[in-house]
């Protein structure tokens, strides 16, 4: 199984993804690591990505998911997956499950402003919130609680016993 933790930047995909993967004994993948350098440069300069920018990124992610599944491996993938078309590209197998992480925009903005060492400019949050298409098929989890509580709710929602 591949669990895709999705949502806008700053919602906690990486933090929660690492914890969830650790609880499950699975590997963790961060979609940010799959962006070509041109995308990173664009985001660093405060310019939102368009669909053409995302195409090679989505192709790399879909290939990584297929490769993991072909080897019989499970993983947690942190990926914004803002549009249904992007999620369709990642849904390469019925065992790919989406968890939509949500929070109040004020909480997300505060997290982005406090975050250090990441290339995503807080000014881009509005463009991500605007681009977000609510998923048709996803477990929806609010991330306003402590990370351990959120991970427990994700595990329960996916049908795994929570620690």
Image: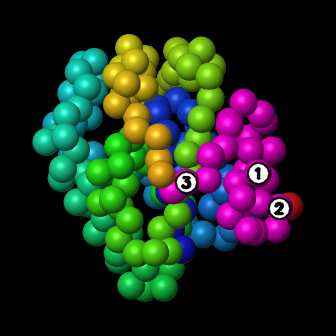
- Characterize the local packing of mark 1: few (<14), some (14-19) or many (20 or more) Cα atoms within 10 angstroms: many
What residue is pinned by disc 3? 138
Q: CA distance from mark 1 to mark 3?
A: 14 Å
In the image, residue 152 sits, relative to residue 23, either above or below, namely: above
Percent x, y of residue 91: 38, 65
Q: Quadrant of the C terminus?
A: bottom right
Percent x, y of residue 17: 59, 51
Quadrant for residue 162, please give it: bottom right
Q: CA distance from mark 3 to mark 2?
A: 19 Å
What residue is pinned by disc 1? 153
Numbered range of the magenta stretch: 137-162
Q: Quadrant of the N terminus?
A: bottom right
State how many labels appear.
3
In this rendering, does residue 123 appear at all? yes
Percent x, y of residue 49: 23, 32
Q: Nearer the viewer, mark 3 or mark 2?
A: 3
What residue is pinned by disc 2? 162
In this rendering, does residue 64 appear at all? no
Q: Are marks 2 and 1 in contact (CB under 8 Å)?
A: yes
Residue 141 painted magenta:
yes
Point out the tag, 2 or 1, that comes first from the N-terminus.
1
Quadrant for residue 37, please give it: top left
Point out the tag, 1 or 3, that comes first from the N-terminus.
3
Q: Nearer the viewer, mark 1 or mark 3?
A: 3
Q: Secondary structure at mark 3?
A: loop
* Residue at 18 percent of width and 53 percent of height: 56
- Name the one closer to the observer, 148 or 95: 95
Q: Secondary structure at mark 1?
A: helix
In the image, residue 149 sits, relative to residue 102, either above or below, namely: below
Q: Is residue 140 rendered to the left or right of residue 128?
A: right
- Characterize the local packing of mark 2: few (<14), some (14-19) or many (20 or more) Cα atoms within 10 angstroms: some
């Amino acid at each position: 199984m591949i669990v895709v933790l999705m949502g806008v930047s700053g919602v906690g995909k990486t933090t929660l993804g690492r914890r969830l993967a650790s609880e499950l004994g699975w590997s963790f993948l961060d979609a940010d690591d799959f962006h070509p350098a041109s995308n990173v440069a664009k985001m660093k300069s405060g310019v939102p990505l368009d669909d053409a920018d995302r195409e090679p990124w989505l192709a790399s992610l879909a290939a990584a998911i297929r490769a993991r599944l072909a080897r019989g491996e499970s993983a947690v993938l942190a990926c914004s997956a803002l549009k249904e078309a992007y999620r369709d590209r990642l849904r390469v197998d019925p065992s790919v499950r989406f968890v939509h992480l949500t929070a109040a925009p004020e909480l997300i903005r505060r997290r982005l402003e406090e975050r250090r060492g990441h290339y995503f400019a807080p000014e881009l949050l509005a463009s991500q919130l605007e681009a977000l298409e609510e998923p048709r098929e996803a477990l929806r989890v609010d991330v306003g609680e402590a990370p351990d509580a959120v991970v427990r709710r994700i595990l329960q929602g996916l049908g795994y016993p929570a620690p």
